[in-house]
């Protein structure tokens, strides 16, 4: 029987890894359908039906298709509410207030953390892989921006164990792909590991079984 | 009796206007608490307790505080589910699938539409207001990016009346502030009004009573 859930895109992509981490936390079985971006498969008519901007990931289950990694993660939490980790978007009894406490930090990731961290990752990790020259001016500009965000994060994580309180949630999960790249695939690990509370948080969230499985998937040889 | 809901920030700010539009659609009474950014009030200790990044808007009701405009909008829809427009995050009977159809276009706004349109608005509308020189290179670079996004939007809005289907939703609403600036306060209106389906959509969504009320609030003299 085919897995009911398909994620389209290479799992090395931070946005694809974000969705994979969410599915693993939720214990929802899935298959990865590789999209060969070097061959332009993400711009093919069939892929554009799933994702009109031609970006990865795209997502399909037996009920619908969804694009944009953070929208896909929310859908997985809502649709598969009774499976796996049931606190990712707040416990049922915490209602709209509990969900909002998480949503505001998901948006912080999306608006404040992701743009500078992704720009740095692109320059420091992806550009060398693709044989391009790293633009150090871009790295430095974005490091200035990211530093301000991480100072706020470190303060926040001195007040509570996770971004939204006592429980690991989607607010923590959405940060994992870019944070992992920074720590493990660039020379900028210190941005996270030299901030006391962020370092404590990183040791915790990066060793969760779901994230360790994503790293294993990223390291596996690509299907030919 | 004081209004139960407070939005902190100047309503001319696109992100504050986004939240005001949502509250008006939901028929939730609110008050605006001006934050004088020219005096650095958004960096004051009391404001940073509401919004740790020192950005507007911040939001407070009798139950909680929330930051980030799109997180605030989601909270308003969830917490005040039975008031005003009840389809903004999908009709109850459409469940997680209906919400995801909306969420993916909210994320498209956040990831693809907002960055280039906000950069253009800053250069073409805010910089002159603040006595700064417009950087036309930034305008042109972002217009190239925005054009690609609007081509996808125009195609989408040729398939359905609104972004997520037959009903006006939060996916449409989140676009209103930046789209309004582009159309009414820059010389780039044609980006929207010269695309057939986007123009039809814009005529519809921008004349909704809630949005017209936001424009009225933006035009009112500021309290001294």
Image: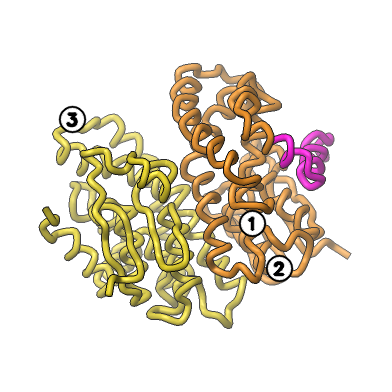
Chain colours: A orange, B yellow
Query: Disc 2 on helix, strand or loop?
Result: loop
Q: Is residue A130 at all visible to an observer of this figure?
A: no
Subunit bearing disc 2 = A
- Residue holding disc 3: B133
Callout 3 and callout 1 share a chain = no
Q: How many marks?
A: 3
x and y percent of residue A124 in the render? Answer: 59, 22
Q: Is residue B138 left or right of residue A213?
A: left
Query: Do the CB atoms of the residues marked 1 and 2 lie less than 8 Å apart?
Result: no
x and y percent of residue A22 in the render? Answer: 71, 53
Query: Disc 3 on helix, strand or loop?
Result: loop
Q: Specify the label residue A73 is tagged with.
A: 1
- Decide: is A124 above or below A33: above
Query: Do the CB atoms of the residues marked 2 and 3 lie less than 8 Å apart?
Result: no
- Residue holding disc 2: A81
The magenta segment is A202-224
Q: Nearer the viewer, mark 1 or mark 2?
A: 2
x and y percent of residue A1 in the render? Answer: 89, 65
Callout 2 and callout 3 share a chain = no
Q: Is residue B58 magenta?
A: no
Subunit bearing disc 1 = A
- Decide: is A3 above or below A202: below
Q: Specify the label residue B50 is tagged with.
A: none
Q: Is residue A41 at all visible to an observer of this figure?
A: yes
Image quarter for residue B100? bottom right
Residue under the image location 64 percent in, 19 percent down: A187
Q: Is residue A215 magenta?
A: yes
Subunit bearing disc 3 = B
- Decide: is B117 above or below A80: above
Label 3: few (<14), some (14–19) or many (≥20) C-alpha neighbours in 10 Å: few
In this view of the protein, which residue sits in the foreground, A111 or B198? Answer: A111
């Amino acid at each position: 029987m085919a897995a009911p859930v398909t994620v389209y895109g290479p799992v090395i992509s931070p946005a694809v890894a974000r969705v994979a981490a969410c599915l693993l936390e939720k214990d929802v079985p899935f298959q990865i359908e590789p999209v060969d971006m070097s061959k332009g498969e993400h711009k093919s008519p069939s892929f554009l039906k799933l994702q009109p901007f031609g970006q990865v990931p795209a997502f399909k289950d037996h009920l619908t298709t969804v694009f944009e990694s953070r929208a896909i993660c929310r859908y997985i939490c809502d649709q598969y509410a009774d499976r796996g980790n049931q606190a990712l978007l707040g416990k049922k009894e915490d209602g709209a207030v509990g969900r909002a406490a998480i949503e505001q930090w998901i948006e912080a990731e999306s608006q404040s953390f992701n743009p500078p961290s992704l720009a740095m990752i692109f320059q420091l990790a992806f550009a060398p892989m693709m044989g391009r020259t790293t633009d150090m001016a871009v790295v430095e500009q974005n490091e200035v921006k990211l530093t301000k965000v991480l100072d706020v994060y470190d303060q926040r994580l001195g007040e509570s164990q996770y971004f939204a309180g006592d429980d690991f949630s989607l607010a923590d999960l959405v940060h994992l792909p870019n944070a992992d790249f920074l720590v493990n695939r660039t020379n900028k690990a210190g941005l996270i590991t030299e901030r006391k509370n962020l370092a404590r948080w990183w040791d915790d969230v990066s060793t969760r079984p779901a994230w360790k499985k994503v790293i294993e998937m990223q390291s596996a040889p690509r299907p030919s």
